């Protein structure tokens, strides 16, 4: 029992604050709620908050459960407008994408819950509307280290769905950049706690202009031969969008945890814990995971919203 | 070996309702399972996985039904793997099965089978269940349940909550105890976790059987030291008002977590081992 600090269920129950728990094992909605109650946000905090937009539309999935392109575009436009404060999508995109940018759209091709072509195309369209030449836009996942556009990219759009994950608790925007290193296996230790360090690599550092976390059909529990079980996938009809990947991921995690609470009827923490989201904040300072420092804007369908 | 994966493969038809079987099936063992199950192979390895046969049926370029047949070496481990993932049992195939939204999982004897057709359609569901039936029928006999399950008290037991394992990580998947292996659960440990109904929230009972009494006593001491440092005779009330209690008997350590009352915790521990027979 030497080395890492031992955390037990008893300790978790005994202590009431996040800080006392000492990190990331049980960072679920109730703990954050307790913190919120203890530390109401003041004006200064308000000014420094990371804005996260949750946009939902029940028409985004067709009868087969696949995304409807037009609705995806509308939702992403609405989210980006809310994020920038601009009235329409093209002017919104022009605040963070310039015509001479070389844009890599980092997607995720996992068989069962991919980013989807509908999302990729919606993002590509708006990058082109902002003036970027089509030849200067690349879409890729596992080949980003060899893709000519990604090799010279000046801007990255990070888009992937959220799902429970065997290695990292949840697959996140932070984790989506693991393909930017040649040795992904070296980031699997300690529940992938060091994933945010990848964002310091020259191939990505400072380049991310927009983060889109797919919450159309998230997976809240990972079991089964391929870490996939349709039983644990539900239609949430949403996207979480923001400039701060940690804030977006932390918000998505709260939804996943709330869904788990509802489904299992008890507080069953993710195993392994989604430690990397919180180390991204506390250790790598990539963004904030603290709901006190996140301004959540909700647009659209509000049933079963879990947050 | 009464049956082999290769023989099981032969009962799967070359074509079913327009879906064609891709030949040859892929075979995996402990050394290359990670190539097939990216990120999840540890689960199977920890249950003493021996061999996997992955059979694919294809109808169109982007549509497939995946049949994964795992030889887990023993019925104990096949059941354990099944128990890890199931939330309910529907009795459709084998000795225990669950079908949900395109995924059928079942176990029989030393085999664990997963058949996935996603997204689900009625037509695909029929195929999945049909393939499952063929495979289950081809396994000639039932396997025994892990004997440790026989120690679980029957009254108020929630049968589908029974989880069998011998790695502490899988305990934490269902009931988080501690971030480290304070119960000293390893390959030589036979452990079962189950939930019991109460008028309030269910509580958990863990029974771990160690290779010998010395190891069980060591695990008890570790648990008391790390989890119940203020216990009186192995019993402690938590800040949430619920009770945790442990008892060691021979090579067996039993722990009740979150019982609604002291009496319930002590009563449950007293009933451990009374049944002494495998799950009905």
Image (cartoon, grey):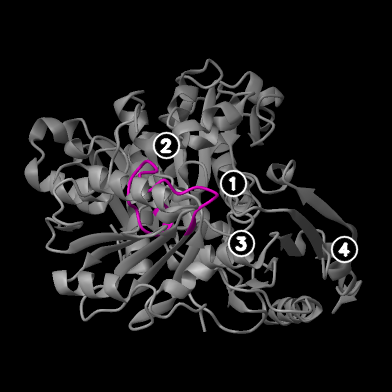
Label 2 CA crowd tier, 10 Å (few <14, some 14–19, many 20+): some
**According to the image, label 2 marks what residue?**
A91
Q: Are marks 2 and 1 on the same chain?
A: no
**Pointers 2 and 3 in contact (CB under 8 A)?**
no
Was residue B5 drawn as part of the magenta stretch in this picture?
no
**According to the image, label 4 marks what residue?**
B6
Q: Which corner quadrant of the image does residue A128 belong to?
A: top right
Q: Residue at x 15, y 69 (%)?
A: B262
Q: Residue at x 65, y 27 (%)?
A: A136
Label 4 CA crowd tier, 10 Å (few <14, some 14–19, many 20+): few
Q: CA distance from mark 2 to mark 4?
A: 61 Å
The disc, 1 or 3, on the residue closer to the chain's N-terminal end is 1
Q: Are marks 1 and 3 on the same chain?
A: yes
Q: Are marks 4 and 1 on the same chain?
A: yes
Q: Residue at x 82, y 70 (%)?
A: B2
**According to the image, label 1 marks what residue?**
B42
Left or right relative to A95: residue B266: left
The subunit carrying tag 1 is B
User: Can residue B208 be seen from the camera position used here?
Assistant: yes
The disc, 4 or 1, on the residue closer to the chain's N-terminal end is 4
Q: Which residues are magenta?
A: B172-190
Label 1 CA crowd tier, 10 Å (few <14, some 14–19, many 20+): some
């Amino acid at each position: 029992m030497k080395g890492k600090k031992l955390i037990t269920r008893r300790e978790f129950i005994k202590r009431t604050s996040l800080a006392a728990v000492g990190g990331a094992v049980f960072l679920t909605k109730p703990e954050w709620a307790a913190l919120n109650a203890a530390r109401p946000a003041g004006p200064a905090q308000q000014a420094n908050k990371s804005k996260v937009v949750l946009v939902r539309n029940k028409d985004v999935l067709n009868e087969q459960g696949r995304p409807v392109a037009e609705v995806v575009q509308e939702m992403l436009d609405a989210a980006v407008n809310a994020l920038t404060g601009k009235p329409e999508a093209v002017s919104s995109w022009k605040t963070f994408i310039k015509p001479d940018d070389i844009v890599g759209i980092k997607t995720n091709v996992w068989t069962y819950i991919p980013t989807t072509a509908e999302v990729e195309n919606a993002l590509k369209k708006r990058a082109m509307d902002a003036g970027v030449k089509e030849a200067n836009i690349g879409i890729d996942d596992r080949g980003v280290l060899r893709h000519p556009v990604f090799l010279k990219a000046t801007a990255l759009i990070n888009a992937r769905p959220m799902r429970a994950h065997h290695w990292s608790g949840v697959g996140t925007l932070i984790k989506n950049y693991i393909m930017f290193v040649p040795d992904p296996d070296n980031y699997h230790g300690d529940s992938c706690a060091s994933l945010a360090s990848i964002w310091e690599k020259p191939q990505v550092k400072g380049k991310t202009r927009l983060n889109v976390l797919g919450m159309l059909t998230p997976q809240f529990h990972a079991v089964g031969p391929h870490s996939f079980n349709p039983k644990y996938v539900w239609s949430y009809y949403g996207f979480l969008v923001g400039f701060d990947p940690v804030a977006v991921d932390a918000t998505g995690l709260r939804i996943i945890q709330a869904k788990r609470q509802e489904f299992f009827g008890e507080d069953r923490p993710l195993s392994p814990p989604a430690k990397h989201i919180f180390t991204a904040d506390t250790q790598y300072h990539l963004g904030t995971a603290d709901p006190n420092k996140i301004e959540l804007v909700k647009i659209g369908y509000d049933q079963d919203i879990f947050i | 070996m009464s049956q082999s994966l290769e023989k099981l493969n032969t009962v799967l038809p070359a074509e079913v309702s327009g879906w064609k079987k891709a030949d040859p099936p892929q075979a995996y063992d402990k050394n290359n399972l990670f190539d097939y199950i990216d990120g999840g192979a540890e689960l199977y390895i920890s249950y003493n996985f021996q061999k996997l046969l992955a059979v694919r049926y294809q109808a169109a370029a982007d549509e497939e039904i995946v049949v994964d047949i795992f030889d887990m070496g023993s019925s104990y481990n096949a059941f354990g793997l099944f128990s890890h993932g199931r939330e309910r049992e529907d009795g459709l195939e084998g000795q225990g099965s669950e079908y949900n939204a395109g995924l059928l999982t079942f176990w029989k004897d030393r085999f664990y089978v997963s058949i996935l057709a996603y997204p689900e359609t009625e037509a695909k569901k029929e195929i999945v269940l049909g393939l499952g039936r063929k495979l289950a029928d081809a396994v000639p006999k039932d396997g025994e349940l892990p004997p440790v399950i026989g120690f679980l008290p029957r009254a108020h037991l929630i049968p589908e909550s029974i989880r069998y394992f011998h790695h502490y990580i899988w305990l934490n998947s269902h009931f988080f105890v501690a971030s480290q292996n304070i119960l000293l659960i390893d390959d030589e440990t036979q452990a079962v976790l189950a939930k019991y109904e109460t008028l309030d929230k269910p509580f958990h009972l863990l029974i771990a059987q160690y290779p010998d009494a010395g190891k069980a006593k060591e695990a008890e001491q570790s648990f008391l030291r790390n989890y119940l440092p203020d216990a009186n005779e192995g019993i402690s009330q938590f800040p949430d008002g619920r009770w945790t209690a442990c008892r060691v008997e021979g090579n067996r350590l039993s722990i009740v977590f979150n019982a609604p009352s002291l009496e319930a915790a002590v009563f449950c521990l007293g009933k451990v081992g009374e049944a002494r027979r495998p799950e009905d």
